[in-house]
Image: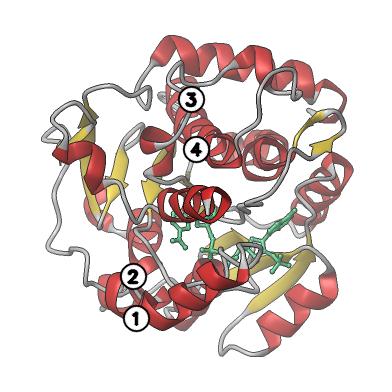
Amino acid sequence: MYIKRRQLIQFSAATAALPLLPACDGGGPVVTADARYPTGPFGAQSTAEEVTVGLDLHGQTALVTGCNSGLGYETMRVLALRGAHVIGTGRTVEKAEKACASITGETTPVALELSDFESAVACAQTVRGMGVNLDMVICNAGINTFGELELVAGIERMFVVNFLGHFVLVNQLLPQMVAAGTGRIVNVGSRSGYTQAPSVGIDFDNLRGEGAFDSSEAYGRSKLANALFSLELASRLKGSGVTSNAIHPGLVQTNIARTAPAFIRGAFEMFGGVIAKSPAEGAATQVYVATSPLLDGVSGAYFEDCNPVTVSGDNHTTDAAMAARLWGAAQQMTANYLV
Ligand SMILES: NC(=O)c1ccc[n+]([C@@H]2O[C@H](COP(=O)([O-])OP(=O)(O)OC[C@H]3O[C@@H](n4cnc5c(N)ncnc54)[C@H](OP(=O)(O)O)[C@@H]3O)[C@@H](O)[C@H]2O)c1
């Protein structure tokens, strides 16, 4: 019984189903509109197609990681529908090819296995070799293991896949983007970054499994890392013409719970249609942030339900010092794979 209850809590939090609970106890993070940035006409029920109505993206190139499933697939589909050339990545080129072949528009499949930094370097090399300017880079791919501690190259797996792999990829692509003086980087984080990350934020002394492991916390930590990476990146890119923002897509019925215990997966499949967004709605925020003319020049912001928000209360999503420290730690952990 204990295990089932714990797993259920993990799942709920991991998919952001329960972020309202902390808000109800009076002490949790509170999300409000961020008045520093423009608010658009879209919201939680908007779809990726709706937020791009009237946009002509012909001549633009987008890179979408994790294009074969869930939010990445819908993001690629809609960007290509609006005319963009989408470079879609999959863990194998076959997966990316299959996804790309199934949609209408100009797409190029590329392999990217985020747990393998060599693969991130190779992916960036392939993209550079295409000789295109990247107008959008959507760091979307991610996992929630729901399981026991797993180490990749001595570092906790979700931290590697959700954050460090993208850290290497983006750093490899940055010189090209900065030289072009344009482009938007969108980091797909999660409310889990402030509802279930460790209370200290990034627990730098526990990234290699030195201390206790809780997969729910570890997922939250990886998603907090996405937000902090975006923040530090925005600060480093100031004046370059390239922007970086982070988003939470909402609770979305995708394959994210694929490794959750069967009874949880079953419940999500059964009730997801009621409590969760569809992939069309879930992809709206990242597609909006990647494309909306209203957001030209906006950088360092954090979005939920298509609008910029700020999270107050006990959380670390805008902790600039932690973001800078994370950048340094990530540099050390991936030093052999950076430009
Ligand atoms: N769904 C939600 O409720 C929710 C809520 C908040 C945040 N998010 C975030 O949204 C993003 C997209 O997730 P989703 O909901 O669309 O889940 P999904 O349907 O499971 O898609 C995840 C994608 O990431 C790819 N991926 C997983 N591990 C990878 C690795 N090691 N290397 C490269 N690619 C890898 C998957 O490829 P394979 O299919 O080959 O494994 C798949 O394409 C994730 O970052 C997730 O954390 C989702």
Mark 2, residue position: 276
* CB within 8 Å, label 4 to label 1: no
State the image quarter where residue 281 is shown: bottom left
User: The residue under label 2 is which amino acid type?
Assistant: Ala
Mark 3, residue position: 198
Residue 127 lies left or right of residue 76; in this view the side is: right
Mark 1, residue position: 273
Distance in Å between CA atoms under marks 4 and 1: 24 Å
| In the foreground, 171 or 27 | 27
User: Which mark is first along the chain, 1 or 4?
Assistant: 4
Instruction: Please state the horizontal and vertical placement of residue 30, each as a whole percent of the image.
Output: 18, 34
- Quick one: SS at disc 1? helix
- Indicate if the residue with disc 2 has its beta carbon within 8 Å of ligand 1: yes
State the image quarter where residue 302 is shown: top left
Q: Is residue 237 above or below residue 217?
A: above
- Indicate if the residue with disc 4 has its beta carbon within 8 Å of ligand 1: no
Instruction: Please state the horizontal and vertical placement of residue 38, each as a whole percent of the image.
Output: 15, 45
Distance in Å between CA atoms under marks 2 and 3: 25 Å
| In the foreground, 44 or 35 | 44
Kindly identify the residue that appears in the image at 22 percent across and 23 percent down. Answer: 313
Mark 4, residue position: 220
Binning the other alpha carbons within 10 Å of mark 4 as few (below 14), some (14 to 19) or many (20 upward) gives many
Instruction: Please state the horizontal and vertical placement of residue 247, each as a whole percent of the image.
Output: 38, 47
Instruction: Please state the horizontal and vertical placement of residue 336, each as a whole percent of the image.
Output: 87, 25
User: Which mark is first along the chain, 1 or 3?
Assistant: 3
Q: Is residue 1 above or below residue 22?
A: below
* CB within 8 Å, label 3 to label 4: yes
Kindly identify the residue that appears in the image at 68 percent across and 49 percent down. Answer: 147
The C terminus, quarter of image: top right
